Image (cartoon, rainbow, N blue to C red):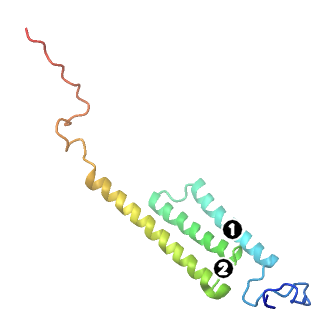
Amino acid sequence: MSAHNSHASHAPDDHGHDGHHSANEPHSTFSGYMTGFVLSIILTSIPFWLVMAKVISDRPTAVLVLGGFAVVQIVVHMVYFLHMNGKVEGGWTLLSTIFTVVFVAIAIAGTLWVMFHMNSNMMPSHTDMPGMESSTAPAETPKAAP
């Protein structure tokens, strides 16, 4: 076994760590966690207030604003709690996350696009089907021969 993989080969440093942390790894601090926690509370409280006070009456605008707050909160969680940045693991963690986000966005957009076009192009309406001119008219009963 190489000295790099052996825990016994590392002498404790002045801070009580066992010395196996590299300079590229993030170091969590209480102030970092508290900053993330406070930002998370703010980014949850504002959308909650917007919805409960009915500040935005236009539904599409409300969806975009709330979605924006959700994206910002995801970034806050990734930075402050998951410690993802361009320096950790040579940037591969951030790069794989970006790839995943792009892939999921393409999959969701493609699915919605296909479903919308299937609904508008392939589903016949009642007026297009023969014999279905009025869905509220009672069915005619055949008359018996006299």
State which quadrant residue 82 falls in: bottom right
| Mark 1 lies on residue | 40
How packed mark 2 is, by other alpha carbons closer than 10 Å (few <14, some 14-19, many 20 or more), is many
| Amino acid at pointer 2 | Met
Does residue 59 lie above or below 33 as drawn?
above
Mark 2 vs mark 1: give the one in front: 2
Between 61 and 91, the residue placed more toward the observer is: 91
Describe residue 67's horizontal placement relative to residue 141 as left or right: right
Residue at 25% across, 47% down: 124
Marker disc for residue 84 = 2
Residue placed furthest toward the front: 1
Image location (x, y in percent) of residue 50: 58, 59
Q: Residue at x 57, y 76 (%)?
A: 97
**Residue 77, position as x, y percentages in the image:** 66, 71
Mark 2 to mark 1: distance in Å? 16 Å
> Looking at numbered disc 1 in the image, what kind of residue is underneath it?
Ser
Decide which of tag 2 and tag 1 comes sooner along the chain.
1
Left or right relative to 143: residue 105: right
**Local SS, label 1:** helix
Q: Quadrant of the N terminus?
A: bottom right
Q: Give the left or right position of residue 128, taking residue 16 as reference.
A: left
Q: Residues within 10 Å of mark 1 (few under 14, many from 20)?
A: some
